């Protein structure tokens, strides 16, 4: 079984590498739009499936395409990637001192089968002051990250006091679940 | 404030580096024995303090010594570092399919002050088969790790389905708590 990971995220590349399976990378653009009436876990499943269906090549018989999407939710508000410094600041102000949810949706697709699932992890952040938040944004430039932070960088080390669920799901792939789903695929 | 991290663990070095504070390394041997009547969180606090008190040099006025100890507990049984392959196998068999606790005790010590605390994280592992467990032990040689596994390697990626608490505490330092304690020190 050869995994084709269709994602530009360096964090996902790192995670899939650690599973010790044969894999390769493919990247193409998909517009990440969705029906706003969808529930949060449905959004990430919808976007993972949309990415899989947009895959521009034919799959070999031993190939499994893996696509994924991650969003951050707080009080029914969906946080995507921040467009600029102010948006990143607003998102982090919202997350600090609160518990939010991170959802990652995954689609596994071969020529015969398809499996779509989502995992949720709760993340509790403590308060950082405005100076600390601005330091984080200017030093780490979290503009490619849903919710404006990486759990594996300075923000995760200092502000994340507790998680409930899969840590790697917050990084962008629920690897333990993916390992099981691939064994059963 | 200059942190002196007295630990041989490469994972702790990595974690303290990410806090962006000035730090240096010191390493010396301490016998990790304790009164077996101690409770689990008392064991790690006792050992962190014991390491701090065994520090062989004088501290400068701007220096803070950081020592730590991590243990894995399941059903009131304390798992330390495995002595050999069989002991590692027995520990991982015990952990798989169950939830266990990881305790890290930390001591911060300057010339005027001392603070000792412990953090607990719950880790839920799913079942791996014997072949997978043996593969992990022979490939990753987890003999320097309490409980015979690293949450940041293949075992953590495939077997750990959920944690409740601080992820970095499982790696050996509750960095978010340490960041706060150092600010208040």
Image (spheres, coloured by chain):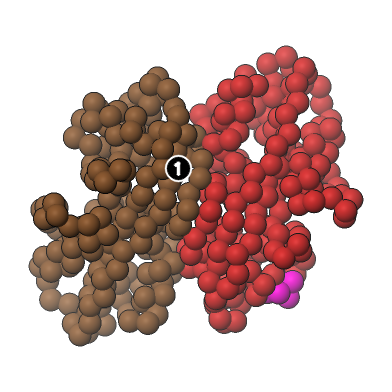
Chain colours: A red, B brown
Q: Name the quadrant containing residue B179.
A: bottom left
Residue drawn at the location 54% of the way across and 36% of the way down: A176
Residue drawn at the location 55% of the way across and 49% of the way down: A165
* Towards the viewer: A112 or A99: A99
In which quadrant of the rendered image does the N terminus of chain A lie?
Answer: top right
Visible residue check, residue A176: yes
Residue drawn at the location 61% of the way across and 22% of the way down: A184
Q: What secondary structure do most residues of the magenta stretch adopt?
A: helix
Residue drawn at the location 40% of the way across and 80% of the way down: B183
**Number of numbered callouts drawn:** 1
Visible residue check, residue B5: no
Q: A47 left or right of B38?
A: right
Please tell me whether residue A184 is drawn above or below residue A100 in the rendered image.
Answer: above
In which quadrant of the rendered image does the C terminus of chain A lie?
Answer: top right
* Towards the viewer: A70 or A36: A36
Dot 1 falls on a residue whose secondary structure is: strand
The magenta span reads A85-90
Q: Which residue is mark 1?
A: B124
Place of residue A20 in the rendered image (x, y in percent of width and height, measured from the top left): 51, 29
Place of residue A8 in the rendered image (x, y in percent of width and height, measured from the top left): 70, 44
Please tell me whether residue B29 is drawn above or below residue A139 in the rendered image.
Answer: above
Q: Name the quadrant containing residue B62.
A: bottom left
Place of residue B114 in the rendered image (x, y in percent of width and height, measured from the top left): 23, 77
> Is residue B92 magenta-colored?
no
Q: Name the quadrant containing residue B112.
A: bottom left
Q: A94 left or right of A155?
A: right
């Amino acid at each position: 079984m050869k995994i084709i990971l269709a994602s530009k995220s360096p964090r996902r590349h790192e995670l899939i590498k650690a599973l010790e399976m044969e894999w390769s990378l493919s990247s193409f653009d998909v517009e990440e739009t969705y029906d706003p009436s969808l529930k949060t876990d449905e959004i990430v499943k919808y976007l993972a499936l949309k990415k899989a269906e947009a895959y521009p090549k034919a799959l070999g018989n031993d190939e499994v395409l893996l696509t994924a999407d991650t969003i951050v939710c707080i009080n029914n508000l969906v946080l995507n990637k921040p467009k600029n410094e102010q948006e990143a600041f607003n998102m982090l102000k919202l997350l600090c001192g609160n518990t939010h949810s991170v959802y990652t949706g995954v689609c596994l697709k071969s020529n015969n089968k398809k499996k779509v699932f989502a995992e949720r992890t709760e993340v509790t952040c403590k308060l950082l002051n405005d100076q600390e938040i601005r330091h984080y944004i200017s030093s780490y430039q979290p503009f490619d990250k849903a919710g404006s932070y990486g759990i594996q960088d300075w923000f995760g080390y200092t502000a994340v006091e507790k998680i409930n669920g899969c840590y790697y799901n917050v990084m962008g792939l629920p690897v333990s679940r993916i390992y099981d789903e691939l064994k059963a695929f």
